[in-house]
Image (cartoon, rainbow, N blue to C red):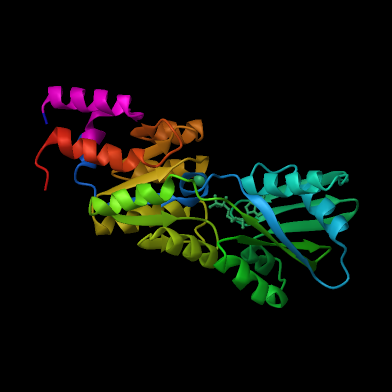
Amino acid sequence: ATPTSIMVGTGRGAEMGVLFRKGEALQLLKETRVVALDKTGTLTEGKPALTDLELADGFERDDVLAHVAAVEALSEHPIARAIVEAAEAEGLTLPAVEGFNSVTGYGVEATVAGARVQIGADRFMRKLGLDTGTFDRAAERLGDDGKTPLYAAIDGRLTAIIAVADPIKETTPEAIAALHDLGLKVAMITGDNARTADAIARRLGIDEVVSEVLPDGKVDAVKRLKGLGRLAYVGDGINDAPALAEADVGLAIGTGTDVAIEAADVVLMSGSLQGIPNAIALSQATIGNIR
Ligand code: ADP
Ligand code: MG
């Protein structure tokens, strides 16, 4: 590519809200074969809401929700905000919390009014030695609906299954269709559970799903998917930064975290994913040799 074609391409990108932080990204995008995307905040709004709460025998809804929300009030995860908002909407008073601890990729725990409260993924409960079997049927149903099931334990007893749902961005289906029209494979990488991830992927026609990935695992997933061909990774969060750096081209959502933007080669100025096929098509048009 000539310096002029890169300048022209970069300028046209800016007009359509695609910011090239590195000129070579425009060139690399042309030969992209795989686009891998983070789920939460990238394919989805990143603003989940609480949808379900099913109790084990002997527990009372308001009491459980108040305990769980009290712990989540100290977490910065989007799931946490969904639970706190639900408790607030029901006018619950949150008890005082001590000894908060966040177990990355698993969940959170703290002592609430003298009771030990844990909330998180099923692997968190397994780690605590708790059997989630009584909620298996509910978890399958919630997962198949594309909702994320979470479990709460109080004083070492499995207490509730809670689900949150994060709406898919309105622009996501057409962006994925446009990537397919360009002949690309589309992959999703998420820490969310397999059933939920599969349901969302099915809805969107996503080709490859890597789910239940721990925070450090996104880089390994990117390395593996690179085996399919030149790879662009799209993400918004702090934990996407290593994957953005590992990808052949990293694209950050402009409404995402500064850490992701710093690690990216390209920034999509709006939250819309339409910028991804636009950027690739632009690269093919300005750099030439369209195959
Ligand atoms: P992702 O960004 O894809 O959700 P994370 O590593 O942040 O990945 O979280 C993975 C899983 O850990 C979540 O889907 C959830 O099950 C659990 N988890 C993490 N933080 C919390 C929290 N504050 N409350 C409940 N569960 C949590
Ligand atoms: Mg995200």
Residue 108 lies, in percent from the top left, at 70, 52
Query: Which residue is outermost to the right?
Result: 113
Residue 239 lies, in percent from the top left, at 50, 44
Is 106 drawn above or below residue 262 in the view shown?
Answer: below
Q: Is 9 part of what is drawn in magenta?
A: yes
Q: Is 251 part of what is drawn in magenta?
A: no
Q: Quadrant of residue 235?
A: top left
Q: Is residue 160 visible?
A: yes
Along the horizontal axis of the image, is 135 left or right of 240?
right
Q: Quadrant of residue 279?
A: top left
How many dots with numbers? 0
Q: Main secondary structure of the magenta part?
A: helix
Specify the quadrant that holds the N terminus.
top left
Along the horizontal axis of the image, is 215 left or right of 10?
right
Is 175 drawn above or below residue 132 in the view shown?
Answer: above
The residue located at (38%, 61%) in the rendering is 205
Is 157 drawn above or below residue 179 in the view shown?
Answer: below
Which residues fall within the magenta stretch?
2-26
